[in-house]
Image (spheres, rainbow, N blue to C red):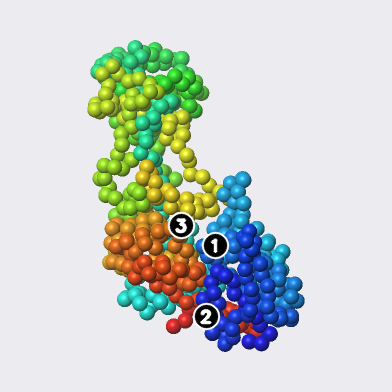
Amino acid sequence: MRQTCIFSGSSHPKLVEAICDRLGMKPSKVDLKKFANGETSVEIQESIRDKDVFIVQSGSSEINDNVMELLIMIAACKGGSSRSITAVMPYFPYSRQSKRKSHRGAITARMLANLLNVAGVNHVITIDLHASQMQGFFKCPVDNLVAEPLLAKWLKANIPEWWEAVVVSKNPGGTKRVTSLADALKLSFGIVTTDRRRPHIMANSMYNSAIFESMGTDGTNDRRGLEKDAEDAEARIHSAGRENIAPIEQDFAHRRTSIRTTSDITDTNQGRPGRARAATAAIPPAVRTRLTNGTSDTPSSPLSRSTRLDSVGAEDGILPDNLAELGLHKSETAPTIEQPPPDEDGYEEPAGEEDSDERARDVITGRLIHGHIVDDNDPQSPSNISVRSGSNGNHGGQRGSGASDDEPLPEAMMQSFMSTTSAHSRMAPPQYALGGTGDATASDEEEEEALKDPDVESTVTLVGNVRDKPVLIVDDMIDKAGSWIAAAETVVKRGGATKVYCMATHGLFGGDCLQELNDCDEIGAIVVTDAFPIPDEKRRLTNKLVVLDVSGLLSEAIRRNHHGESISQLYQHFN
């Protein structure tokens, strides 16, 4: 191409050579060096006056040096009177920092876009930005190319019965990318999500917690005494009903209830003691609030109010006339919670056999400990560790004189409700970004740290049917192996998939990521592009790695940009 110069940065020289070979030209001459103190020096060694300049610089392990080198090269070309300057960045640095995660955080991707504009760039060409809305950070045109056609072409040629495959996203944030590939190939898709649970250390979970439970008239919670009080109360109620109320016929089809004040039936409602929740469900509870470790503030909760029948309408001073005639029946609801009335608005029909949703069978859950799927009955699970009051270390004494860790919890404790002051609530809640969405704050680094923490159990959920089918786990980059291995084990061990292919555009492979992926038996192949440089020593670590060439995509984008042609065809799938 005439009047065109293609310069190579120090990040990915092999890719630049492949691009120039396809365009039938050689890389332009530039001298890149560093001073003794680490400063970068750039010198353009050929004329660029009135020429279209393309600077190819991707990310690498020395990402900050690459960014500074690119900015200096742009400034040098601008000073050399070039016609236009296009930054070709196959992997855009700092693309994962496109949202502010806290009030004192920085949107680094926007800052880098501003630096490119100040340096003098006129156009930016990149591949698969981490967030497509990042194009709004730039004050110049941005061509965000996609590697999806390359990945689709490879899987059609190398995956047997690829039309039966299921495209799976390993987190909710990549759903749009997964559905795009699934729609293009007419495939089914699924989603894998993880939800963090409580840590192993739960010894102080009941410390400073408020317990709502029943107590006897003497202030104790002795079970036998509570049962006796309940039986006496029941006997008094029945005897009072026989003495004061004569049997009458009732027309339940046309029942009328007269209203009278509370003072008229004070004698009937006096002397009703509380009862144990687990002992009997026939007597309304007299609920009292008891704070276990010296806390005197009563939490505002609807559970602290009694739901006895005689309390209905008590705030207005009126009660139904036939209160004593209303029978008390055992309810299957939780203690002290009224059962909601049936829906009688006519909009909902009773569920029948034909209303069963068969798609619910496509939702599978599992447990992740230390980033791996474990059996539901694994005793090492934090969820199987009992939480009991009176085992609070040095923070409190025993609830009973004979209580010990080997004894079962009392019924009142098993059915108690913990307030917001308990250690459950004092655990670190999930932090959300300023926008309020979970995907805005959960970076890959945070997700990997949570999966590797042995004190945290995660619940993994697979949505989609993958049984006896190959699975394609797709994302924009592979940096750490934890989430990929967790998703692969989930679809194979829980979902029953036959084989797993991990596919991404950028293979960053930080640390021992590539080795860990290679050691995972559930993963059959790791497919990435060479948009991000992969050292030869890492490639030799595994025989599962497949690297696709993006030089054809970038060279065609450069050619069309130079001649002013449309690049719409670069987004289309080809055979």
Categorize mark 3 by other alpha carbons within 10 Å: few (<14), some (14-19), many (20+): some
**Relative depth, front residue between 35 and 470:** 35
| Residue at x-position 47% and y-position 77% | 549
CA gap, disc 2 and disc 1: 22 Å
**Relative depth, front residue between 30 and 462:** 30
Which residue is label 2 attached to?
18
Q: Is residue 243 visible?
A: yes
- Tell me: residue 355, above or below residue 336: below
Categorize mark 1 by other alpha carbons within 10 Å: few (<14), some (14-19), many (20+): few
Identify the image quadrant of the C terminus.
bottom left
Q: Quadrant of residue 457?
A: top left
- Tell me: residue 367, above or below residue 173: above
| Residue at x-position 38% and y-position 40% | 199
- Disc 3 + disc 2, Cβ < 8 Å: no
Q: Position of residue 347 (x, y in %)?
A: 43, 50
Q: Is residue 360 visible?
A: no
Of the image marks 3 and 2, the number of the one nearer the N terminus:
2
